[in-house]
Image: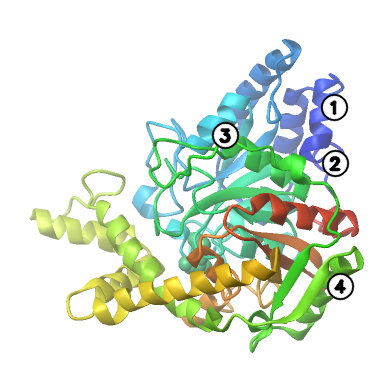
Amino acid sequence: MPNNLTSLTIREARRLLDARQVSSVELTQAFLDRIQQVEDRVKAYVTLTPELALEQARAADRRIAGGSAAPMTGIPLQIKDNMCTRGVRTTCSSRMLENFVPPYNATVVERLNAQGAVMLGKGNMDEFAMGSSTENSAFFPTRNPWDLERVPGGSSGGPAAAIAAAEAMGSLGSDTGGSIRQPAALCGVVGMKPTYGVVSRFGLVAFASSLDQIGPFARDVGDCALLLSAISGHDRRDSTSLPNPPQDYAAALTGDVRGLRIGVPKEYFAEGIDPEVERTVRRGIGILEGLGAKVDWEVSLPSTRFALAVYYILAPSECSANLARYDGVKYGYSDHTAASMWEELERTRQGGFGQEVKRRIMLGTYSLSSGYYDAYYLKAQKVRTLITREFQEAFRKYDVLVTPTSPTAAFRLGDKTGDPLQMYLSDVCTIPVNIAGLPGLSLPCGFAGGLPVGMQIIGPALGDAAVLRAAHAYEQATQWHTRWPEL
Ligand code: GLN
């Protein structure tokens, strides 16, 4: 069990900090101690920044003493290692960027810094966010705190495991096809992918730009809403950032879902789903119904079955363009053993990228090449529009859709590394949400075989507050978010 300070929610810590019953230095030290205690088993961090953390904590204590604390002042957080942190190595868990120290901060990091948050370190991930288990990290896999022989999910496995193991109060992840929600589900924590454009991606290392979105990990929905409020809002440095002003998402948490129209799309309970996961999620939806929501259990979204295929054309295509910049000249790793410039470029990319990244680059280059472009890339774009329209149609009738987050609970390390297709299937429930640019949140709704199960709540574009409200109401009526793994 985590100790008294590391098991607090951000809101509880805020009250104690503001009442001067605990200092940010004490709180931060408690997390550094906890990390010391469990990190060699969990491996949630690529880089730890204890000196920086304590320096930020001291600054936070001065700010609190001056009476100008913001919601995140003095709160110890982790950041996934694909968001640029000035002066702190940002690796994307890749050899390619193993020694890359960014000269600037991502906008989300700037916003947390402006509030006086504390950064404990950088979270482990699948290399360049490609994967569903964190086994594609070039450094080491992260382990699931509920069962150390199992994966935490991915690609934000470090952030999800860090929250479950009480190694941070909150974390930021990125979600291109499920990388926040799927690990949140597998580790029994809350993770949210906001509407595309709600959070700036300036300083997020790009994977698939039409899908990538940053979002929070937290112990519960209230903390998740606070973190989202802290990082969202327009940023002129990201051309896809929506012009909306920052919003107070915590204000949306009324606890009331009476009359909320919930749709349950049957395609998300199709073949491949673990029967115990299905039962657990259906029971979760039943609780929302008991709270007064109006549930339609028989919704159909037939284009769902194309989503995975569409994603595995579009995401690799975009990644093949985005990752062209790693040429051994501009950033990171460089192989200088070659005789010519071209050979150096080849060797750099051969040695710097892992298997899965190379597979994606080749898939993407193939589907973008002349002769195949129309058959693959263009076709996938058309089907993307169909999937998006189908969701829009559904949201005329329903306020939110509720599904499983992942078809199974956490699997064993090594179980899916030999079969990329099996690995890709772990995101079958989360990928459609990215394709349509919608908000989606995963929260714990029970256990299957002793492992956490996640329930996904999907909203219409800019329905982030509605998603949070439904999740919060469910959480108020249940106790899953108060359980901790034995570590
Ligand atoms: N698991 C999916 C993939 O491998 C999604 C990853 C992500 O959301 N970054 O692409």
The total of numbered circles placed on residues is 4
Earlier-in-chain disc, 2 versus 1: 2
User: Residue placed at 59% from the left, 52% from the top?
Assistant: 462
Earlier-in-chain disc, 2 versus 4: 2
Indicate how the structure is coloured in the image.
rainbow
Q: Which residue is mark 2?
A: 3
- Mark 4 close to ligand 1, CB under 8 Å: no
Residue type at numbered disc 3: Thr
Residue type at numbered disc 4: Gly
User: Element at badge 1?
Assistant: helix
Task: Evaluate whether residue 284 shows in this view.
Answer: yes
List x then y, in percent, for residue 474: 84, 59
User: Residue placed at 21% from the left, 60% from the top?
Assistant: 347
Task: Classify 10 Å Cα crowding around label 3: few (below 14), some (14-19), many (20 and above).
Answer: some
Give the vertical position of 242 relative to 69 (above or below): below
Residue 16: mark in rendering: 1
Q: Nearer the viewer, mark 2 or mark 1?
A: 1
Determine the CA span between mark 4 and mark 3.
44 Å
User: Residue placed at 73% from the left, 17% from the top?
Assistant: 64
Q: Nearer the viewer, mark 2 or mark 4?
A: 4
Task: Classify 10 Å Cα crowding around label 1: few (below 14), some (14-19), many (20 and above).
Answer: some
Task: Classify 10 Å Cα crowding around label 4: few (below 14), some (14-19), many (20 and above).
Answer: some
User: Element at badge 2?
Assistant: loop
List x then y, in percent, for residue 411: 66, 75
